Amino acid sequence: MSSSVVFKSFIGLRHSSTAEPPKLHSHTNSISLLPRRRLHVTASKSSPRLQNRNLRAAVIGGGPAGGSAAEALAKGGVETYLIERKLDNCKPCGGAIPLSMVGEFDLPLDIIDRRVTKMKMISPSNIAVDIGQTLKPHEYIGMVRREILDAYLRDRAAENGAKIINGLFLKMDMPKGSDQSTAPYLLHYTEYHGKKGGTGVKKTLEVDAVIGADGANSRVAKSIGAGDYDYAIAFQERIKIPDDKMEYYENLAEMYVGDDVSPDFYGWVFPKCDHVAVGTGTVTHKGDIKKFQLATRNRAKGKILGGKIIRVEAHPIPEHPRPRRLLGRVALVGDAAGYVTKCSGEGIYFAAKSGRMCAEAIVEGSENGKRMVDESDLRSYLEKWDKKYWPTYKVLDVLQKVFYRSNPAREAFVEMCADEYVQKMTFDSYLYKTVAPGNPLEDLKLAVNTIGSLVRANALRNEMEKLSV
């Protein structure tokens, strides 16, 4: 089937905007977009109406969370600034996005490298289970490169009126004076002008609200005393493999589990445009990350043989939300807030979604930038977020604790993944970010099978312990 026929079958998704890929790295070049849609709200506010200006907001960080937040703010009539140090940043990230994100965030198909329709889950004993037979013809998991996705979202924010600043955020002075509810936040940053190795120019910026989208090592989080959290180290190598081997990964992703690749996570081989991303992560044994990476490469050795490493990347990934995500008119989103799921390690969709939700709360509270906002306006974002997504995080936390605790438990997990009902429920929930309605009889069978798998896993572990004595 030709690609043009496949693209036409995608239901409710935006087609590629141009025949040629858009220029994503220059903020002066225009990008083909759908007509600008302005978010209008009607709200009753006791906060003062702003005189002779609109509300000013700064977004710190230019990843999916920051780009989505800046776009929503600018569309909503807020004077918007986005500060990002590395406009060509290549975050070590598997790069998987759910189908719903393509439609919900109006992403053109030409920024998606691969449309994965098949996955292999590979157990510690190298038993492979094929996943994906329940997918419908138009369904897939998108694989993107972060440098492409992030730049596209930033450029689109700029098209809608956000000012993109190539700068390093340094610190933030909290509001001062008799009326701290309306006094500005003073941001300190170093601005760069594209000259590599340049020292930059120290500058300041006064704003009324701040969205911290600056990742796991968030300086905005430190500024508001948001507290620490456990984090994983993700390590990834981009490997250019021979064309004949690349064909194997054309629409296939692999996930490896086992103590050799990670004691508490998984290893992956995800396809990109002309290479594969091979990586792993861990919370508990960060010092051994390179050993786990070598094991991941060895598990996939026959399929990536002859490959050349073209880039090595490493980055911290949060394991749970921060103790504080909001203070005054400052809110955290994405990795800065700790929005990465356990078990799967998914963060891109939740970053973009949280950035947009936070920005929309500011737009609504300010009546399209006409009034000052307060903490209650931003808190509405947290309340909606927790109500919608907190159960997802808790369920995946439990799954990780149950199935990633030992090799026998991982064997049970892979065995369970072979069940067609499990695959359907998992993919439906992942692709559309909703809890898929279950069949009571199938749910009962699943519970029995899960218990059986765990019992077998526990028996296997006991036998292995006897052998090691």
Image: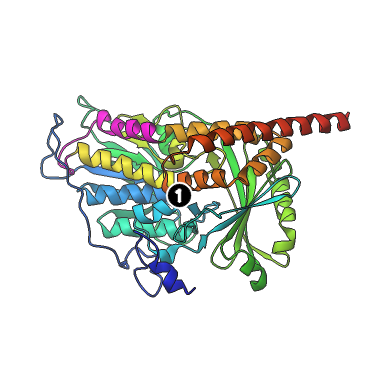
The amino acid sitting under disc 1 is: Leu
Work out whether residue 429 or residue 342 is closer to the camera in this orientation and state it: 429
In terms of secondary structure, where does tag 1 sit? helix
Is residue 103 located in the magenta-colored stretch of the structure? Answer: no
User: Residue 154: horizontal and vertical position, in percent?
Assistant: 36, 56
Q: Which residue is mark 1?
A: 431
Residue 179 visible in the snapshot: yes
Is residue 371 located in the magenta-colored stretch of the structure? Answer: yes
Q: Is residue 332 left or right of residue 448?
A: left
- Residue at left offset 59%, top offset 39%: 232
User: Residue 56: horizontal and vertical position, in percent?
Assistant: 23, 43
Prevailing SS of the magenta stretch: helix
Work out whether residue 167 or residue 407 is closer to the camera in this orientation and state it: 407
Work out whether residue 237 or residue 117 is closer to the camera in this orientation and state it: 117
User: Residue 40: horizontal and vertical position, in percent?
Assistant: 17, 46
User: Residue 102: horizontal and vertical position, in percent?
Assistant: 39, 56
Magenta residues span: 367-388
Work out whether residue 46 or residue 174 is closer to the camera in this orientation and state it: 46
Tell me if mark 1 has few (under 14), some (14-19) or many (20+) residues whose alpha carbon lies within 10 angstroms of its own: some
Q: Which quarter of the image is occupied by the C terminus?
A: top right
- Residue at left offset 52%, top offset 31%: 229
Which residue is farthest top?
Answer: 178
Vertical position of residue 431 compared to residue 394: above or below = below
Vertical position of residue 132 compared to residue 33: above or below = above
Q: Quadrant of residue 364?
A: top left
